[in-house]
């Protein structure tokens, strides 16, 4: 049977071999790789992906959650075409009105945002947030939580998926490098905290309060392990007390829990917030929003003196540097604004959350009927399937689940027309239908039978 699937995706195998000669590992992001080879896609529509061999899949990866309206949503397409027609170009490289419109929209939607800057990725947004926090506080270490992802740059490539053998005690995790090629500088300057453990987190923050500029976190780790309400509220209190900037990385959660992110849902205002993914409606984007007194450090008006000082000014007096050729790209912002407009219809978000709930319940029922220990965990329109009945509150709990079985199920599912990267979480779109959900449950049932 495994032979069978390989026969079905022989075009992907050949394309992968070809790509490997000019692209390391045949993929443009390491995470897109899986053995024996990734499946190469050709086109997509709604909830469906079609590979270069013509196989059809119901897509639960949805470009790592970005495509909340599914593939090629007509309202987004229309907005993009219209924008390109109207402006007669693709990009200006100068200010334009959509930047203001989107910034105003985000300021209205997110309680923690007074001002906005756009970037081309979520990575750039969190990177900028850290520079701002360091400039604002004059401190140069950053604290992050074990298992949390904020983009692949050196300071944040710490303890995302560490081998627990070298990761230290649960209440005082070590800083572990996620990549070769990293200087020890970053391990020394990135403090690692235990998620959902307020007592241990507070102890570490108090001990290093004079060095730590910011705490950054995913309010819902990986999109599916939510912060306890008391934890996130406690964290807000402690960071305020200690003069530490609180950064919410809402690249995943910004539009997937509710429009307005985890900060709206929890009623907790961070100092800075990073956005991405859904914000671009399928195009590359990121944004950083936050309190005016911090964000304003970027205003070039702050650095006006530099024009008259002959360049002799100290770096500490200068405006905080932020740049990007394609920042605030009009086509991207048109797609993002159209996406947000669709999501702002309360019925749309309600339907999406109901579909997600339905799928989660049906999956749990199915596995439990087969006496398999399993739970779905998540919040909003993202969830994960974990094979453990222990409560999962952080990275260490998650690593106790049976990931091997999960991957074996996912490989069977690929053959049965359900797409996600083996082991990855599930994202749902507004166009996943009841028929999709039924087909997904049937496929899981078959996968279970095959593995028994
Ligand atoms: N932060 C979080 C929470 C993310 O999920 C991601 C992307 N998976 C990023 C940051 C980085 O975003 P990008 O891939 O757009 O750089």
Image: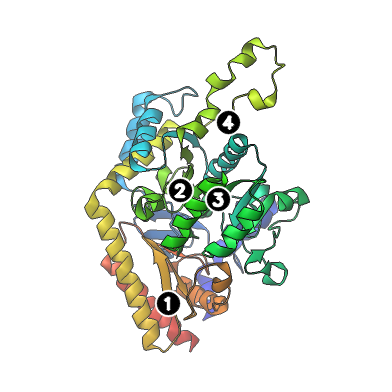
Q: Are marks 4 and 3 in contact (CB under 8 Å)?
A: no
* C-alpha gap between disc 1 and disc 2: 26 Å
Asked which secondary structure carries label 3, the reply is: strand
Q: Nearer the viewer, mark 1 or mark 2?
A: 1
Q: Is residue 26 visible?
A: no
Asked which secondary structure carries label 4, the reply is: loop
- The image shows residue 148 at horizontal and vertical percentages of 56, 58
Residue 14 is labelled as none
N-terminal-most mark, 2 or 3: 3
Give neighbour class at mark 1: few <14, some 14-19, many 20+ (Cα, 10 Å): many
Left or right: residue 151 versus residue 223 is right
Asked which secondary structure carries label 2, the reply is: helix
* C-alpha gap between disc 2 and disc 3: 18 Å
Q: Is residue 290 visible?
A: yes
Q: Nearer the viewer, mark 2 or mark 4?
A: 4
Query: Residue farthest to the left?
Result: 347
Q: Is mark 4 within 8 Å of ligand 1?
A: no
N-terminal-most mark, 2 or 4: 2
Residue identified by numbered label 4: 322
N-terminal-most mark, 1 or 3: 3
Residue 216 is labelled as 3
Q: Nearer the viewer, mark 1 or mark 3?
A: 3
Q: Are marks 2 and 3 in contact (CB under 8 Å)?
A: no
- The image shows residue 358 at horizontal and vertical percentages of 29, 70
Q: Is mark 2 within 8 Å of ligand 1?
A: yes
N-terminal-most mark, 1 or 2: 2
The quadrant where residue 373 appears: bottom left
The quadrant where residue 336 appears: top left
N-terminal-most mark, 1 or 4: 4
Q: Is residue 287 above or below residue 19?
A: above
Residue identified by numbered label 1: 375
Residue 277 is labelled as 2
């Amino acid at each position: 049977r495994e032979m069978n699937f390989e026969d079905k995706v022989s075009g992907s195998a050949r394309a992968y071999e070809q790509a490997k000669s000019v692209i390391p590992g045949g993929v443009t992001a390491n995470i897109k790789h899986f053995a024996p080879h990734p499946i190469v896609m050709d086109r997509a529509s709604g909830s469906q992906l079609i590979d270069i061999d013509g196989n059809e899949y119901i897509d639960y990866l949805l470009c790592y959650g970005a495509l909340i309206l599914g593939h090629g949503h007509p309202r987004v397409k229309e907005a993009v075409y219209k924008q390109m027609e109207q402006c007669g170009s693709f990009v200006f490289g100068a200010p334009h009105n959509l930047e203001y419109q989107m910034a105003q929209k985000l300021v209205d939607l997110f309680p923690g945002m007074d001002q906005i800057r756009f970037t081309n990725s979520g990575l750039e947004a969190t990177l900028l947030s850290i520079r701002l926090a360091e400039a604002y506080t004059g401190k140069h270490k950053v604290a992050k939580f074990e298992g949390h992802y904020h983009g692949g740059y050196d300071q944040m490539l710490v303890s995302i998926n560490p081998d627990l053998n070298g990761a230290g005690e649960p209440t005082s995790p070590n800083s572990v490098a996620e990549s070769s090629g990293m200087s020890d500088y970053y391990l020394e300057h990135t403090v690692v905290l235990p998620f959902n453990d307020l007592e241990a987190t507070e102890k570490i923050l108090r001990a290093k309060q004079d060095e730590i500029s910011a705490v950054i976190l995913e309010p819902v780790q990986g999109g599916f392990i939510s912060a306890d309400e008391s934890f996130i509220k406690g964290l807000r209190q402690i960071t305020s007390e200690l003069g530490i900037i609180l950064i919410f990385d809402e690249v995943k959660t910004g539009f997937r829990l509710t429009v307005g992110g985890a900060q709206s849902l929890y009623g907790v205002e961070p100092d800075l917030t990073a956005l991405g993914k859904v914000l671009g409606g399928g195009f590359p984007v990121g944004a950083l929003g936050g309190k005016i007194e911090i964000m304003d450090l970027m205003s070039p008006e702050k650095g006006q003196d530099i024009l008259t000082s002959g360049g002799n000014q100290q770096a500490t007096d200068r405006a905080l540097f932020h740049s990007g050729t394609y920042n605030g790209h009009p086509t991207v912002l048109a797609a993002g604004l159209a996406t947000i407009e669709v999501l702002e219809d309360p019925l749309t978000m309600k339907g999406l959350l109901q579909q997600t709930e339905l799928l989660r319940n049906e999956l749990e029922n199915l596995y439990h009927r087969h006496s398999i220990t399993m739970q779905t965990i998540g919040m909003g329109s993202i969830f994960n399937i974990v094979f453990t009945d222990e409560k999962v509150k952080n990275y260490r709990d998650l690593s106790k689940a049976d990931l091997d079985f999960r991957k074996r199920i996912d490989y069977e599912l690929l053959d049965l027309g359900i797409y996600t990267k083996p082991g990855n979480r599930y994202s749902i779109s507004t166009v996943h239908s009841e028929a999709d959900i039924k087909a997904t449950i049937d496929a899981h049932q078959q996968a279970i039978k095959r593995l028994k």
